[in-house]
């Protein structure tokens, strides 16, 4: 989502990341609500995954504010390149 917001919509890096994070939060909340209504939520494993993910989001948001936009863009590009290489070799 972030690359599309950067290239097609013209968002800056920080705005694209924040928009993506907000979208993920909304989608996750709707998903867990629908699964919970049907009784398909396992709270223990959910918390085991959700708490570190939420903490990582907070740490990432704080770190993002401290990094220069060029460093942030380079780090994100490196992450995407690394994922691309991993997908090619696996």
Image (cartoon, rainbow, N blue to C red):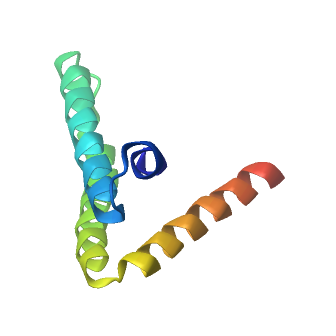
The percent position of residue 45, horizontal first and vertical second, equals 33, 46
The one of 84 and 5 positioned closer to us in this rendering: 5
The percent position of residue 28, horizontal first and vertical second, equals 27, 37
The percent position of residue 83, horizontal first and vertical second, equals 64, 57
Q: Is residue 27 visible?
A: yes
Residue at figure coordinates x 25%, y 59% from the top left: 54
Residue at figure coordinates x 36%, y 63% from the top left: 13
Q: Residue furthest right?
A: 89
Q: Is residue 48 visible?
A: no
When asked about the image quadrant of residue 61, the answer is: bottom left
Residue at figure coordinates x 30%, y 74% from the top left: 64
In the picture, which quadrant includes the N terminus?
top left
Q: Residue furthest top?
A: 38
The percent position of residue 58, horizontal first and vertical second, equals 22, 68
The one of 40 and 22 positioned closer to us in this rendering: 22
Tell me if 75 is positioned left or right of 45 in this view: right
The one of 15 and 34 positioned closer to us in this rendering: 15
């Amino acid at each position: 989502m972030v690359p599309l917001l950067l290239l097609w919509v013209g968002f800056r890096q920080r705005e694209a990341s924040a928009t993506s994070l907000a979208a993920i939060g909304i989608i996750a909340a709707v998903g867990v609500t629908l699964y919970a209504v049907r009784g398909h939520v396992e709270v223990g494993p959910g918390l085991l995954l959700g708490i570190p993910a939420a903490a990582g989001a907070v740490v990432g948001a704080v770190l993002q504010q401290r990094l220069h936009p060029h460093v942030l863009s380079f780090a994100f590009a490196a992450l995407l390149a690394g994922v691309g290489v991993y997908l090619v070799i696996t």
